[in-house]
Image: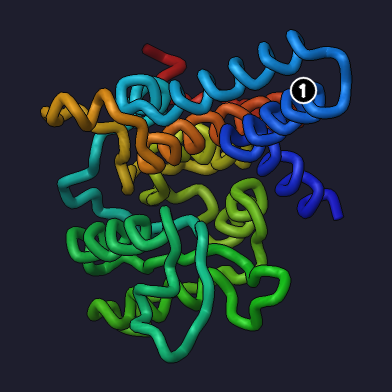
Amino acid sequence: MLFTLKKIVGGLLLPLPLLLLVIAVGLLLLWFTRWQKSGKIIISVGWLALFAFSLQPIADGLLRPLEQRYPTQNKTTSVDYIVVLGGGYTWNPDWAPSSNLISNSLPRVTEGVRQWRLNPGAKLIFTGGPALTNPVSNAEVAARVAMSLGVPQTAIIRLDRPRDTDDEAIAVKQIVGERAFLLVTSANHLPRAMTFFHHQGLKPIAAPANQLAINSPLNWWEKALPSPLWLSHSERAIYEGLGGLWQRLNGKTTADPTTASE
């Protein structure tokens, strides 16, 4: 119940639903009350915020500090395990396996497979329980995609009970113990994920995937025109900010020992 409530409240606080609610309040004031000026101000603020969050410089400016925390892993690290965290997914057996991984999940899995090729003796651990109405778990779908990309079944471990990152850290601890391992997840999610895993006393090595904030040159109109793509980048930054706040409220804020000593 708490998990579902957390997802609903968190979803409502993201830019699009929150600002649509703000604009709806302004419209109600305009149409049904005498608070005309207040309604106009609320609608204007909501529209301006939605416009701003849909611009590339603002959206990627919010996201970039999260994604630049850890560099990409491009070398063999001699680890026994590579942990790939779950994300969005569905299950339709008539689709190509990779089509069942939504949004951030497919880049995580493909990066996990790439890291496995750099460390072919390692085991790939996929995490993620089933969605409420889905008979197939996130971990199982990710494993099937990995096998379709050439990873043998014997190299894969499925952890199909965890429902969030905190649960994933607890489940991974039962397998890896005190050994170092690669932790693969979206670059913007890594700072929070690393904190959860360090809180469990684990030794993750960050392996970011799915970098979104663009540093390479763009056409001027791509920076000047609002786009749902840039809005989704703002959403990721705000989602991680809300997740970090919840993490601190729950007291799971063990520092990364590799940065604490710097």
* Secondary element at tag 1: helix
Visible in this render: residue 236? yes
Q: Residue at x 53, y 63 (%)?
A: 127
Residue 175: percent from left, percent from top: 54, 62
Identity, as a three-letter code, of the amino acid under mark 1: Leu
Occupied quadrant, residue 17: top right
In the image, 177: left or right of 69? Answer: right
The single residue placed furthest to the bottom in the displayed view is: 94
Q: Is residue 154 above or below residue 254?
A: below
Front residue of this view, candidates 183 and 247: 247
Q: Residue at x 44, y 74 (%)?
A: 100
- Count of marks placed on residues: 1
Quarter in which the C terminus is drawn: top left
Residue 95: percent from left, percent from top: 39, 84
In the image, 118: left or right of 68? Answer: left
Residue 177: percent from left, percent from top: 54, 53
The single residue placed furthest to the top in the displayed view is: 37
Q: Is residue 235 above or below residue 66?
A: below
Visible in this render: residue 258? no
Colour convention of the picture: rainbow
Residue carrying label 1: 30
Front residue of this view, candidates 258 and 66: 66
Residue neighbourhood size for the residue with mark 1, other residues' Cα within 10 Å, grouped as few (<14), some (14–19), many (≥20): some
Q: Residue at x 44, y 40 (%)?
A: 232
Quarter in which the N terminus is drawn: bottom right
Occupied quadrant, residue 42: top right
Residue 78: percent from left, percent from top: 25, 53
In the image, 116: left or right of 189? Answer: left
Front residue of this view, candidates 25 and 110: 25
Q: Residue at x 44, y 50 (%)?
A: 179
